[in-house]
Amino acid sequence: VGSPSNQHWELQKVLRDEYTGEVHISTGMTTKEEIEKIVRFWEEGKGDAKNRVVMYNCTSGYPVPFRDVCLLDIRLLQEKYAHRVKAIGFSGHHLGIAIDMAAYALGAEWNERHFTKDRTWKGTDHAASLEPAGLGKLCRDLVATYTAMTYKSEDILDLEKEQRAKLKWGQ
């Protein structure tokens, strides 16, 4: 459910009551009170927000300047809704892919980006979209970031031992 439609209650009712799959809802152009209303709506009846709804932090603009991406709102959504919806994601309309890595590092479990064959095409989305090569780089870098998001399994990793033997003072 794109940001413009997240207050379209007839659509939401059909998705909640007649569709049984996951529903992904973007929060661009949406007040905190409206977000709460969305989650409450999905918690009613047979909505099952906890197992079906993915809420996306989003700023609706094309493209969104970095200062307006507001990544820390991911944390606000996590604090208020992580226990009430299936997952928290990030929907980006910014340039490049670095912000997506930061969103993932902040805990966004889903990453939504627009993609296009040509960023110079007319229309609101194309300039802030990723072309095929950029989409490939985004996927590559998300996998690399996922791989790197670990704790050390031991104080000195095997790959550090040789360097430690050569360089470490006071051992």
Image (tube, grey):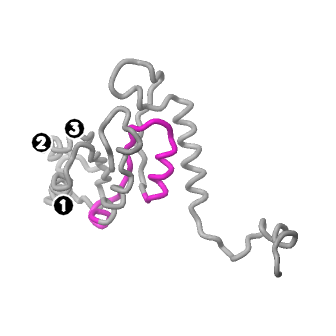
- Measuring 43% from the left and 59% from the top, which residue is drawn there? 107
Residue 115 - label: none
Image coordinates of residue 158 in percent, x first then y, are: 78, 69
Q: Dot 2 lies on which element?
A: helix
Residue 2: image quadrant is top left
Q: Give amino acid for label 3.
A: Pro
- Residue denoted by label 1: 43
Is 84 in the magenta? Answer: yes
* Amino acid residing under circle 2: Glu
Image coordinates for residue 49, horizontal then vertical, percent: 25, 58
**Local crowd size for mark 3, using a 10 Å CA cut-off: few (<14), some (14–19), many (≥20):** few
Does 129 sit above or below residue 138?
above
Locate residue 42: give its quadrant.
bottom left
Q: Which residue is mark 2?
A: 10
Q: Is residue 163 magenta?
A: no
Closer to us: mark 3 or mark 2?
3
Q: Is 76 placed left or right of 31 in the picture?
A: right
Distance from label 3 to label 2 (Cα)?
14 Å
Q: Position of residue 55 (x, y in %)?
A: 30, 52
Name the quarter where the C terminus is drawn.
bottom right
Q: Secondary structure at mark 3?
A: helix
Which residue is found at the position 47% from the left and 46% from the top?
A: 99
For the N terminus, give its image quadrant.
top left
- Measure the alpha-carbon separation of dots 1 and 3: 21 Å
Query: Foreground mark, 1 or 3?
Result: 3
Reading the image, the residue beneath label 3 is 4
In depth, the one of 129 and 84 nearer the eye is: 129
Marked residue nearer the N-terminal end (3 or 2): 3
Question: Sequence order check: which comes first, mark 1 or mark 2?
Answer: 2
In magenta, the rendered stretch is 80-107
- At x 60%, y 51%, the residue is 144
